[in-house]
Amino acid sequence: MLLVLTAVALVAGGVLAGVNEVTAPRIKKINADNLSKGIRTVMGSGNVQVASPEVKDGYEFYAVSDTDGQSVGTAVTTATQGFGGPLKVLVGFDSKGTILGYTILESAETPGLGAKANTWFQKGQKGDVIGKNPGECNLTVSKDGGCVDAITASTITSRAFLNAVQQAYNELYARYDSQTSATNVQSEKNDMKGGQDE
Amino acid sequence: MNNMRVLLNGIFKENPTFVLLLGMCPTLGTTSSAVNGLAMGLATMFVLVMSNLIISCIKNLIPDMVRIPSYIVIIASLVTVLQMLMQAYLPGIYTSLGLFIPLIVVNCIILGRAEAFAAKNGPLASIFDGIGIGTGFSMALTLLGAVRELLGTGVVFRSDDFGLAGIALQGESYGMLIFVLAPGAFLVLGYLIALFNKFVIKQQ
């Protein structure tokens, strides 16, 4: 009896190890491909070089420059709690902190409602955030006094998404501040904080 | 019983969703759209056919007392294999269903068929039973998902992960949101069970 159960467990373990051995490199490659494709999408240009990531407090910063080595901006991965589970977003900022683009990396939002987040905030859509700067405009839903229209009937997802973008911006500038003490960046940051307290 | 009857039995007379009422958790949880329901049904069918086959082959080797733990180990391993294969070779479907795949382990249809059918029948009949029950489950989930998606959003078979635009049957702004949310799952399931029993089962 014990022997049979042990044998079953051993065979199962062996099969799993074998399949993992075969699939792990492919899964790793797919994830890496998705990320690099995502970075090119959010930076709005395919012709860029992506530096290896800097990881801090769960955020990943990818410094992006064009083919001449001129800095284009930074792509940041950021995560918050959405309506159905974690919401992981990749956002591209230019050097002034203006949003260049975003893509949803991971989400568990309700299909037909919160799942619309992957198109709703894109350029030309109702909740367009592209070209907005979290330091200049209050990046929350209009219900909370912000400058972005929430997804219809999905305020929680909208808040989670905007919060993720805002956090990415905050972290990005916190990082800049520790490197340089540029005054305009500092004042932008203060403006933004004022907006958040409302 | 011949194999064709075993197959049809799973789709109609013992439909896991509408008649046996097994596996209600994934049924209610994943059917917020027709494509999700279909994909969940097919993934479950794969595990069901494989577990039925393996269990019917080794049923005489496993002592009665450790039969349930052995079945669970086999089923859990199959689900993990499926998850890894999907992640590596079908990343589109995996992103859409990733959260629900591990739930197949606790789907009582699979353990139920292992106990009720595969442990008492030969490998070939067990495969047919897996296909039949799996098809019944997939059809039920797709139907449930389609009704909920249509009433909830006005579009059916929409999937951004596969780039399907869907079939718009009414304006998107006329969607009744409750059908996409959890209460809608119970409402639609209740009505579908009633209709299925009245029109499909009566005729048998």
Image (cartoon, coloured by chain):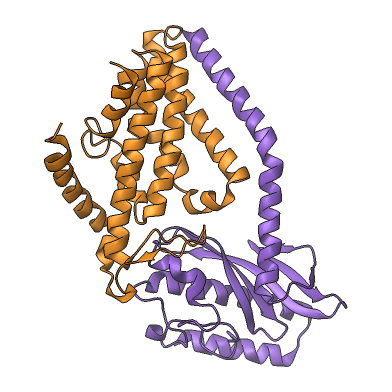
Q: Nearer the viewer, residue B82 or B130?
A: B130
Q: Residue at x 69, y 64 (%)?
A: A37
Q: Is residue B181 visible?
A: no
In this view, the residue farthest toward the right is A68
Q: Is residue A54 above or below residue B102?
A: below
Q: Quadrant of the N terminus of chain B?
A: top left
Q: Residue at x 51, y 87 (%)?
A: A138
Q: Which chain appears purple?
A: A
Q: Quadrant of the C terminus of chain B?
A: top left
The picture places residue B59, in percent across and down from the top left corner, at 42, 11
Q: Is residue B82 above or below residue B121?
A: below
Q: Residue at x 56, y 77 (%)?
A: A166
Q: Is residue A28 visible?
A: yes
The picture places residue A105, in percent across and down from the top left corner, at 58, 61
Taking the image as shown, residue B117 lies to the left or right of residue A148, namely left
Number of numbered labels in the structure image: 0
Q: Nearer the viewer, residue B69 or A122?
A: A122
The picture quadrant where one finds residue A61 is bottom right
Taking the image as shown, residue B166 lies to the left or right of residue A96, namely left
The picture places residue A167, in percent across and down from the top left corner, at 57, 74
Q: Is residue B11 above or below residue A75?
A: above
The picture places residue A98, in percent across and down from the top left corner, at 64, 85
Q: Which chain appears orange?
A: B
Q: Residue at x 41, y 86 (%)?
A: A142
